[in-house]
Amino acid sequence: MPHRSRLAGFIIDCRTDDLDAAADFWSQALGVRIADRDAGDDSAEYQQFGDTPGDLHIEVQKVDHASRVHLDIEADDIDAEAARLEALGARKVAFVKRWWVMEAPTGQRFCVVRMKTPERGHPPNAWD
């Protein structure tokens, strides 16, 4: 099925009790501003950065697992993109809310999320 996808950005997973302090650190370290301290929802705590390089989506996320950085790939059809990535050797780990958590053949976790603004940023890649 034809679809489009591209790198959306990076999520900085932080195992912390103080998400404000973590976001403040990463904001200063990366030289970006905190655009939304309440970007999460009832079951997830995020803080989103603004004015990011290349207009990438960058967030700090409070997590229960070990701290790490993961990337998001955004697609206009997340199931088609997950299937394309499986054909390249990735594997589906879990479907969470509205996105696929996947694992590369080399073990890195990443997410396939819904594309929000295809007209902004770098043009998406088109796949058959």
Image (cartoon, rainbow, N blue to C red):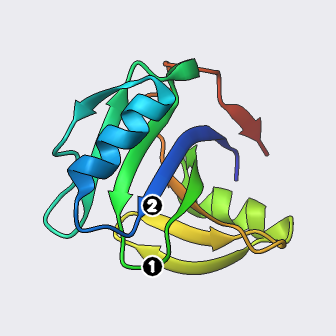
The tag on residue 102 is none
The amino acid type, in three-letter code, at marker 2 is Asp
Look at the image and tell me whether residue 116 can be seen.
no
**Residue 13: numbered disc:** 2
Along the line of sight, the residue nearer the viewer: 25 or 118: 25
Residue 14 appears left or right of 119 = left
* Residue at figure coordinates x 64%, y 77% from the top left: 92
Tell me the quarter of the picture where residue 9 sits: top right
Q: Position of residue 15 (x, y in %)?
A: 38, 70
Answer left or right for 1 relative to 101: right
Asked which secondary structure carries label 2, the reply is strand
Indicate the position of residue 100 as horizontal and vertical percent values: 52, 68
Location of residue 59 with respect to 14 vertically, above or below: above
**In the rendered structure, are the residues bearing label 2 and label 1 in contact, judged by CB atoms less than 8 Å apart?**
yes
Residue at the disc numbered 1: 65
Task: Find the distance from the CA under tag 2 to the CA under tag 1.
Answer: 8 Å
Determine the residue positioned at 34% across, 69% down.
Answer: 97
